[in-house]
Amino acid sequence: MSSPLARPNKRWIERAIVRLHRDMSHDRRVRSLSGEIAGELSRRFSGTEGTIAGVDIGCGDMGIAEGISSFWPRVEWECLDIYELPVEREKLDPRWQKYRRFDGQRIDRLDKSADFALFTDVLHHVPEDGRLPLLKEAARVANTVIVKDHLGMERGAPCSGPWTSLAAGVWVSVPRRWAGSPSGSYATSAAS
């Protein structure tokens, strides 16, 4: 689901379609996926004390980050997206205080200052020649990079890309209704 900041003045039909999608599948999908990722983070960081610094790159409505925190509250989030946050939104809703705008290429953080970076259904929105540089940027700022995308779901698209060399595969099972078949190409990869 796109960021609520993407185009606040959508036509009524666009708003109706987004609402229908949210009501029929999005919220259920976010909850299930958040639980899967929270479980992976819990296993990966089981020996670590205190909070874990996470960067959600291309966070959209921040639903995944917030969903993960509902299952595993140890994460201190920074949520990044390319849209400007209206000042009144941050003032009226404190949940947006973890949101930061970025240019889609450079992440304003020190090297290895986050425990993990997360891309959830983001890379298929990035031009193909920008994917590897963005993944390398995430690897610069985080010790672990987790990618979940459905790049293989487009007709004729391969399930993998040049970025897979950064990652050891950690496959997450996805319900058939999302992938269309048991061999659907939703994958989570983690590079340490």
Image (spheres, grey):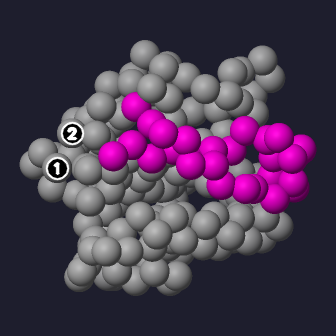
Q: Amino acid at mark 2?
A: Arg
Image coords of residue 87 (percent x, y): 26, 67
Please report the bounds of the magenta region as a residue range.
166-192
Q: Quadrant of residue 49?
A: bottom left
Identify whether 79 is placed above or below 126. below
Task: Report whether 4 appears left or right of 31.
Answer: left
Secondary structure of the residue carrying tag 1 is loop
Residue at figure coordinates x 75%, y 28% from the top left: 154
Crowding at dot 1, Cα within 10 Å, few <14 / some 14-19 / many 20+, comes out as some
For the image, the number of numbered tags is 2
Secondary structure of the residue carrying tag 2 is helix
Residue 140's disc is 2
Image coords of residue 2 (percent x, y): 57, 51
Q: Is residue 187 visible?
A: yes
The Cα atoms of the two marked residues, 2 and 1, are separated by 6 Å
Q: Quadrant of residue 54?
A: bottom left
Residue at figure coordinates x 81%, y 46% from the top left: 179
Q: Which residue is mark 1?
A: 112
Q: Earlier in the sequence, mark 2 or mark 1?
A: 1
Q: Where's the N terminus, which quadrant?
A: bottom right
